[in-house]
Image (tube, rainbow, N blue to C red):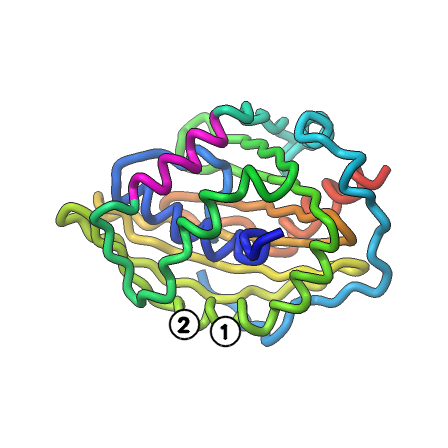
Amino acid sequence: MSRVLFRPVLAGSILLALTACGGGGTPSGEPAPTAGSVETAPAASSSPAEVDPGTYSSEDLAEILATITTPDGSPLTIVPPDQVSAALGQATLLMDGVTITPSECDVVPQDFAKLAGDAETAIGVAPAADGLSAVSASIAVADGVEDRLAENAEKELALVSTCSTYQIEMQGVIVRGTMESAGTGMEGSTSFGIRNSIVLPDGQQQNNTTVTAARGDLLVTVTSQVTGSPSASSAVLEQLAGRVLAAAEG
């Protein structure tokens, strides 16, 4: 398994800004995350679950997500696998002629373009009726993902620090963003959170909070994306991520 699973939040943040810059949507359901405490390490697991990656297909994971509701009780709409693949391909195409500063933040191609091939994955999205907010959740299963996440934690958090302020330019359009770690404390799993804020081309501010949690061979990422208002707290998203993990393990 490649490092694609180790930077879902950072790459999601950049992809979110990139699609905003290019006038596209956020098709993968993996958007990213306004101010808060900075973590130096993710919350550590005391007892990772034993999950055989071979026991789950993407269809199985989609069925699990279909049983999950968001904090306000809205059901998740499962994104069809072909749409996920198409969105990942679109992210790669959008990179032509794009300049990301700092250059270290240019993580979209390697982290998203190979996602579908690296693990069984499912994504669900619950957009608000006003179109100004959405909650998304993804679940993936791959051998030893929690151990790999923990091994790379220090390097990944350092990269988030490097990308605390970034800029994306495409065809003369500039999107600026800020990013920082957010505290998490999920018991029995390795987890971390990120808050991200970008200024859209129309001047609106889009705020996002993302929590990623890994337990054994399961990786869950949940995101609150809100335009013009604060996004959900990491504590609320931790609860949602915990419910997804529990459903997969049950």
Q: Quadrant of residue 71?
A: top right
- Residue 168 vs residue 54, the one in the foreground: 54
Instruction: Tell which residue pokes out farthest to the left in this image.
Output: 172
Q: Position of residue 19 (x, y in %)?
A: 33, 41
Q: Which residue is mark 2?
A: 162
Q: Position of residue 243 (x, y in %)?
A: 75, 42
- Residue range in magenta is 83-94
- Residue 6 vs residue 29, the one in the foreground: 6
Q: In the shown orientation, is residue 84 left or right of residue 153? A: left
Q: Quadrant of the C terminus?
A: top right
Please, what is the three-letter code of the amino acid marked with disc 2?
Thr
Q: Which residue is mark 1?
A: 158
Q: In the shown orientation, is residue 165 left or right of residue 139? A: left
Mark 1, residues whose alpha carbon is within 10 Å: few (<14), some, or many (≥20)? Answer: some
Give yes or no for contact between labels 2 and 1 (Cβ–Cβ under 8 Å): yes
Which label is found at residue 248?
Answer: none
Q: Position of residue 90 (x, y in %)?
A: 36, 35
Q: In the shown orientation, is residue 134 left or right of residue 154? A: left
Q: Quadrant of residue 135?
A: top right
Query: Which residue is pictured at 72% across the width and 58% down the height?
Result: 146
Asked which secondary structure carries label 1, the reply is helix
Please, what is the three-letter code of the amino acid marked with disc 1?
Ala
State yes or no: residue 21 in magenta: no
State yes or no: residue 90 in magenta: yes
Vertical arrangement, residue 87 with respect to residue 197, above or below: above
Q: Main secondary structure of the magenta part?
A: helix
Q: Position of residue 14 (x, y in %)?
A: 39, 53
Query: Which residue is pictured at 40% across the width and 51% down the height?
Result: 108
Mark 2, residues whose alpha carbon is within 10 Å: few (<14), some, or many (≥20)? Answer: some
